[in-house]
Amino acid sequence: MDWISTYRGETEPDQERVGRLRGRIEERRRHSRRGPLRPWMAVLVPLGMGAGWWGFAREAPISERSLEGGGAPELLAISRDVGVRFAGKGQIHGTEREPHIRWEAGTLTVEVEPDRGVKLDVTTREATVRVIGTGFTVQRDALGTRVAVAHGTVEVTCAGREPNLLEANEATLCLPTSAAGLLARAAALRDHGAPIDVVLSTVDLGLTGQTDTSPVRNELLLLRMQALAESGDPVQALADADRYLDARDNYRRDEVLRFAAVVAMDSSGCSRAAAYLRPLARPEALAADLLMLADCSDDPREVSALLLLAQERASTAEELGLVAARAAAAAGASP
Amino acid sequence: MATPAVRSDLLLAARAGDGRALDALCTQWLPVVLRWCQRLGGRGVDADDAAADVFVRVLDRFDGIRNLNSFDAWIFGVTRRVLAAHRRRAWLRRWVPGVVADTNDSAAGPAERAEMSEISRQVQAALDLLPEEQREVLVLCDVEDRTDVEVAAMVDVPVGTVKSRLRLARARMRREAERLRLGPDQVPARLSLVRSEAGDGLD
């Protein structure tokens, strides 16, 4: 027997159940016939008044308020037709018939009572979700905006895309479109251990259309440089370092010089690292800079002076240890 | 065919207030309405309560029915409206603070659920996941063996719409069947047709 036949047979009501139900119906009808007034007449006027009030109330504006909760999800009944659970941050405004939610971060679950004409939308930077009668969850984090439908149907419009209908148990992810959003997504992907090509493609998407003066562009270059170095591509990593150093407003210049110097020393030795080390040779140099400069110097007196300065600048036991070890090696090597 | 044939003389007599005719109609149609409520009600709806509400309305308003030829469409319409109201109430119960959430997964009551096999429970759970309009046509066509023309009249949409909803519902049901591991060998012949239809981009 197939499962529809099984289901059909087992959902066929038996005589006893039908008989019981008939008794209930008869009982209710007997009650409804009592009294000089037909019950619907007694109910009609208040219902009419209620409907009028209801129509008015549904147009009533919702006072703009913040939805903010960090710990356990909070429950809020926005109106009789709309309920939300949230753990994160957002704002709500609009009317009871047309509530608008701006969701910034975290998880938001929305339940809209079906067939009541409620037009609710949830907007994030990456997506707009429009709904009439359904339940769904919007989760926004650095990776983008994820919309998952529990029941009903919603229309999801990812920024810059065509609207897409999602049904129950379906989900979609709207990727960030701004350079800053893509930077955050790329950083989150890297933190989550995503494959390097996925991180790089996200960074490259963010770099598209960015001007040389954009701070986000510089941060994207930094991320790209780090990802490439970690993936074993020092040539490309150093090329990105050079692009960063050539840019204006490169306020993380020293960090990049230091990072590029390490990458260059590891891959090609001091000859390649010299270009990055030279700008670091200045009075306010860090112990780490001075150690690298000492590593690449052929002059014993210069090495000795650099190590002495490094010892003064060392701020941690680890740095002191490194300086001491380098000094011991220099002493052993000197004639 | 699950719908009883309705004699026009019976309907005329019932509309005129003949108690015996009303009684006969009740005997014929109460099981049908109860089936609809159970299969179409959805999560948290008590099928018996809903069917009782349908019949109270039907019997109260029977004298207002205009077209006796479309009695099944009329009573199905009443059932839909009652079920919508019950779904709203079930929905509200879940959101009113202090009220224990309804634990029923489907419109079947506890006793009925206990009598249902695991397969039927899973089929009901899968049906409850379908959008309402798709669930209606799937139940009316595939479970109750109505033709698409009959169903179109009942749900008041064009035949083409019924066909497209049915195609979507079958594809969805097949996915749910696979997810619930009902097993391909247990997919009935009508639903297994979806396998060939799935190639037209429905999946």
Image (spheres, coloured by chain):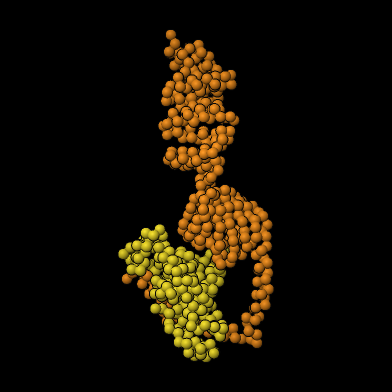
Chain colours: A orange, B yellow
Residue in the foreground of this view, choosing between A302 and A254? A254
Can you say whether B170 is above or below A270 in the image?
A: below
Residue in the foreground of this view, choosing between B96 and A88? A88
Task: Pinpoint residue A111: horizontal percent, then vertical percent.
Answer: 55, 61
Q: Is residue A3 left or right of residue A149?
A: left
Residue drawn at x 49%, y 58% as measured from the top left:
A166
Can you say whether A329 is above or below A176 in the image?
A: above
Residue drawn at x 49%, y 87% as measured from the top left:
B11
Task: Pinpoint residue B171: horizontal percent, then vertical percent.
Answer: 40, 63
Task: Pinpoint residue A77: horizontal percent, then vertical percent.
Answer: 61, 60
Q: Would you say residue A81 is visible in this rendering?
A: yes
Q: Would you say residue A318 is visible in this rendering?
A: no
Picture quarter with the N terminus of chain B: bottom left
Residue drawn at x 36%, y 67% as measured from the top left:
B191
Number of on-image labels: 0
Q: Is residue A228 left or right of residue B85?
A: left
Residue in the foreground of this view, choosing between A113 and A29? A113
Picture quarter with the C terminus of chain B: bottom left
Task: Pinpoint residue A334: horizontal percent, then vertical percent.
Answer: 44, 11
Can you say whether A54 is above or below A207 in the image?
A: below
Can you say whether A168 is above or below A300 in the image?
A: below
Residue in the foreground of this view, choosing between A145 and A217? A217
View extreme (top): residue: A335
